Amino acid sequence: MSVALKENLKENLAQVFDELPVELLAEVVDFAEFLREKERKKQTGMKAKKKRVFGMYQGQGWINDDFNDELGDEFWFGEDFGIIKKDDESVD
């Protein structure tokens, strides 16, 4: 970027700054800092996200054999609620 172009952009930016309210100036500064950080990462070769590797954690998780078994009424209602009678499994 030429020096003259950069100076022209700075002058235009200064003019815009003079016309904006303080609240919007804070947003402009936040955005400029975001762009500066993005450029710094680009210059240093940092990537925003790592690539995913298919099958990287294969075999490291498991599901119990009883995963699909039906859950008993004790799970849904609990034994302390008195909803289920132990003798005939009927509801009060």
Image (cartoon, rainbow, N blue to C red):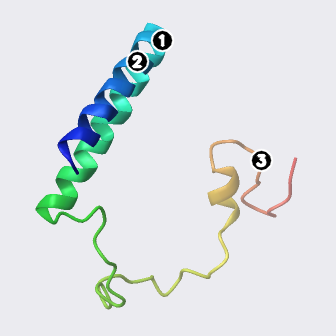
Q: Element at badge 3?
A: loop
Kind of residue indicated by mark 3: Ile
| Residue at mark 2 | 15
Sequence-wise first label, 3 or 2: 2
| Residue at mark 3 | 83
Kind of residue indicated by mark 1: Glu
Locate residue 44, reporting x and y percent: 11, 60
User: How far apart, in angstroms, are the residues tagged by discs 1 and 3?
Assistant: 71 Å
Tell me, yes or no, whether the two marked residues, 2 and 1, touch with CB atoms within 8 Å.
yes
Residue 18 image-quadrant placement: top left
Residue drawn at (70%, 51%), measured in percent from left and top? 77
Residue drawn at (24%, 65%), measured in percent from left and top? 47
Q: Residue 6's mark? A: none
User: How far apart, in angstroms, are the residues tagged by discs 3 and 2?
Assistant: 75 Å
| Residue at mark 1 | 19
Tell me, yes or no, whether the two marked residues, 1 and 3, touch with CB atoms within 8 Å.
no
- Label 2 crowd bin: few (<14), some (14–19), many (20+), radius 10 Å: few
Q: Residue 15 or 57: which is nearer the viewer?
A: 15
